[in-house]
Image (tube, rainbow, N blue to C red):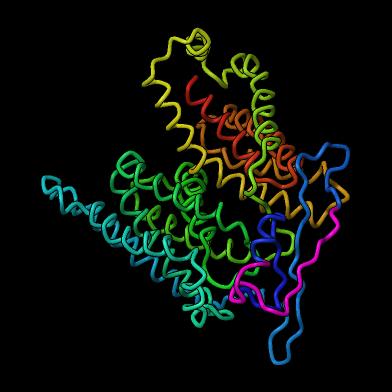
Amino acid sequence: MIDSTEKTYFPSAHYASYLKNSSSNSIHANTTIQVEEERPLFEGLPVVARSPVYTASPVTVTGQKSSSSCKLKYSWLTIFIVLCINYLLAFLVYFGRLLQSDMTYVFLFRPQWLGIFFGLCPLLACLLTLGHQGVQNKIEWLLQDSTEIWPVLVVCIVFAFLGAVSFNISGGLEGSINIFSIIVFVCALGSLHQPQLRCTVGLTWSDATAWILMWVTLDSHWNEDLFFGRQVFVYDFWSLMFSNLSVIGWKIFRKLPGFHFRLYPVQLGDILVAISCALGLAVFLPLAVALHYVPPVAWDRLKMVMEGSLTIGHLLSVTLVFFHLFFTVALVEEILFRGVVLAGLDGNFPQYPYCTLICSSILFGSSHWGHEHQWGSRLLTCAVDSLGGMVFGLAYRVTDYNILAPTLCHALINTGRAILF
């Protein structure tokens, strides 16, 4: 349910029309829908399939809080409790890893399987109900003011425990990656159906999607590779902590006025922009090989692709790799670096479009610092990925903040690298 005192943004005319004609539970009866004039943030570039931004104007109601109630205040007590819970869960994960060494012959009682079983039940229950308006209305009394964070923390801690047990003890992503791919796929489809993000009462599909994708991608990039490694107690704790803080940050960011992106409707122009950007980046393949960013064996594999010597099994594997990279890597990075960072910088500094694009791209490139182990290789990786981030940012702007275009381009590039490596 959307508070009538809050300003809500709808990403497309299709959903604005849908919500306007929906029941009174969705939008307050006194809320009016108006069209806002758009000002391009990146002048000089053609804009594909621009659609007007619809706004639910705030209504002043006596006795209710103003739109400033969107800003949540989190006390030190909340952070302290989260720290304590994370320490407890990290100890349980660490103890489970030690226990597994003495009971590996008992298949059904392995800690990671127990974690998947107990964690998957509430996970699927939340994902299948959070997108339903009736469920949000029933739990609205739990989600008012600053207490809104408590159910969010409970859900994300359950998710984090599942992720820590199944990922850390198994020693890699292979044991549970299929389960997480399916869950992320379901979350992403729910997000496509529920594109509205800002000032929404209750949890949404987008919240669940953000947590899972942030854990899988960002924790792997910035925690495991850079600092602590995998097989230590400290990693267990910080992986849980990073997940919870990411959800808290997401809950704050999605209420900011400058934070918006659209996933729907999918238009042909957006897909063409993504493919064009991916082909444009492919032009730099010879340079990447010359700088040893891509191994020379990539030419042999590229020759196999061009000659059509790949079998049906190879093509099926490539398709599965593409969908896996789309939902578990490309989508979260584009939501963060384009949907949050770039859009936020554009909203605060609209007079410096080139600077905001460069800054967000450098941040994107620096997130891949841990992929290499030597300083020269790390700098080269960050530089190449920053260049890719600029292309993704241009695709994001040209398609009028459609997150699908840079995500599709990103997934195509990553899939190509997976084939050639």
Q: Image check: 191 left or right of 275?
A: left
Tell me if residue 144 comes above or below residue 257 in the rendering: below
Q: Residue furthest left?
A: 105
Q: Which residues are magenta?
A: 20-38
Q: Is residue 27 magenta?
A: yes
Residue at point 42%, 59% (across, down): 240
Q: Nearer the viewer, residue 210 or 34?
A: 34
**Residue 122 x, y percent position in the rendering:** 35, 64
Q: Image check: 238 left or right of 403?
A: left
Tell me if residue 341 comes above or below residue 79 in the rendering: above
Tag count = 0
Residue 94 can be seen in this image: no
Residue at point 39%, 55% (across, down): 234
Tell me if residue 235 comes above or below residue 19 in the rendering: above
Residue 88 can be seen in this image: yes
**Residue 292 x, y percent position in the rendering:** 57, 18
> In the rendered image, which quarter contains the N terminus?
bottom right
- Give the overall secondary structure of the magenta segment: loop
**Residue 269 x, y percent position in the rendering:** 71, 35
Q: Is residue 264 magenta?
A: no
Q: Residue furthest bottom?
A: 63
Q: Nearer the viewer, residue 255 or 93?
A: 255
| Quadrant in which residue 20 is drawn | bottom right
Q: Image check: 178 left or right of 351?
A: left
**Residue 203 x, y percent position in the rendering:** 52, 67
Q: Nearer the viewer, residue 258 or 224?
A: 258
